[in-house]
Amino acid sequence: MNFYGRDFLRILDFSEEELRYMLETAKTLKRFKHKKKNHKIFPNNNIAIIFEKTSTRTRCSFEVAAYDLGMGVTYLDPTGSQMGHKESIADTARVLSRFYDGIEFRGFKQETVNTLAEYADVPVWNGLTDECHPTQVLADFMTIEEHFGHLKGLTLAFVGDSRNNVANSLMAMSAKMGVNFISCGPRALRPADDLVEECRAIARKNGSTIVVTDDLRDLEGKVDAVYADVWLSMGEDKEKWGERIQQLKPYQVTMQLMDRLKPNAVFLKSEPIFLHALPSFHNLETSIAQEVYEKYGVKEMEVTDEVFESDRSLVFEEAENRMHTIKAVMFLTLYKKEKK
Ligand code: CP
Ligand code: NVA
């Protein structure tokens, strides 16, 4: 397996073995971090992290992971560089490659991160685009595996806007890792057919299935982990809130839904878990949630506060794992093994 110098743009670009190795590396780095063991492996390296969209977890994960690995970091905020408006993506990539050893990019078009990767001489890591969120799902699968002790044969259900970036990457990761995946949401928001077909072919080889449905009853009795994400993603028109609420309200993750996922779960000690990429609109404690409430009267959106705050919810473990998995991706793509 050779990761050195490679970009991390999509889950589909990596084999099951490579993704497994990333998860194992993340587990080792997590142990190092918890034991406060020095792992400043790259004291002479620097990275640039570019954000066209806002972020808490991804930005902090890249920064802390880089510091832990001994690297310097430059953060370019949504207005902080010339990229795109005054300087082309290709030119920016070629300039930054002269300064930095790796580049993270979060933004709108997948094409932008692809172009950065094409022109940069150093690894480019995708920190989220409209199309996918590959570093997120590494953390999600690490969290699922930590909880259940394995991945193969489990069933993960994504409920909501099933064609968004997180849902797309979860489907790809499930297919690669032999996890059954149920994509559940309204027909108008179902995932693209070509992505479903590609993932189904991969899943078939790995012994799992991909189901696309608009019927929540298809989740009953089967699901080990249920995943929700915001109903309107960054970059989407705020005018769409009304329509999305109407489309997605029936797909809110409630305690009643959690209870229907696995009969006898309490008895069998296999209660389904709840996951979410975060940030989440589970109460009115944010300005956007407040605005939506005033306009549409909705107090909780993709998940109820009850589920979010319950012991079935592993969202903060998941958030922590963002840092360990991002560190693993940086470590693997920057570390050059000495030739013997
Ligand atoms: N989950 C996630 O990517 O969070 P941020 O938007 O805060 O980075
Ligand atoms: N689908 C969400 C994920 C945020 C981490 C968005 O793109 O806004």
Image (cartoon, rainbow, N blue to C red):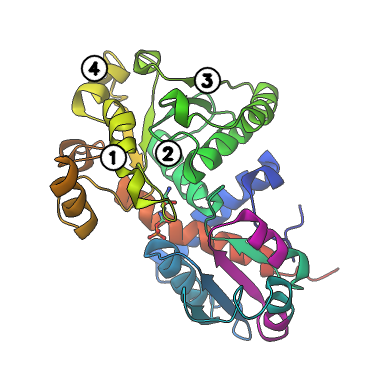
Question: Which amino acid does the dot numbered 1 rest on?
Answer: Gly
Question: Comparing marks 2 and 3, which lies closer to the viewer?
Answer: 3
Q: Quadrant of the C terminus?
A: bottom right
Res 267 label? 4
Q: Given the image, on which type of amino acid does mark 3 rest?
A: Val
- Residue 22, x across and y down, in percent: 60, 52
Question: Mark 4 vs mark 2: which is more N-terminal?
Answer: 2
Label 4 packing within 10 angstroms: few (<14), some (14-19), many (20+): few
Question: Could you tell me how far apart the alpha carbons at marks 4 and 2 are, in whole angstroms?
Answer: 20 Å
Label of residue 242 in the image: 1
Asked whether mark 3 and ligand 2 are closer than 8 Å, the reply comes as no
Of badges 1 and 4, the one in the foreground is 1
Q: Is residue 236 above or below residue 37?
A: above
Residue 312 position in % (x across, y down): 25, 36
**Lower position in the chain sequence, tag 1 or tag 4:** 1
Q: Magenta part of the protein: which range? A: 95-116
Task: Tell me the SS state at disc 1.
Answer: helix
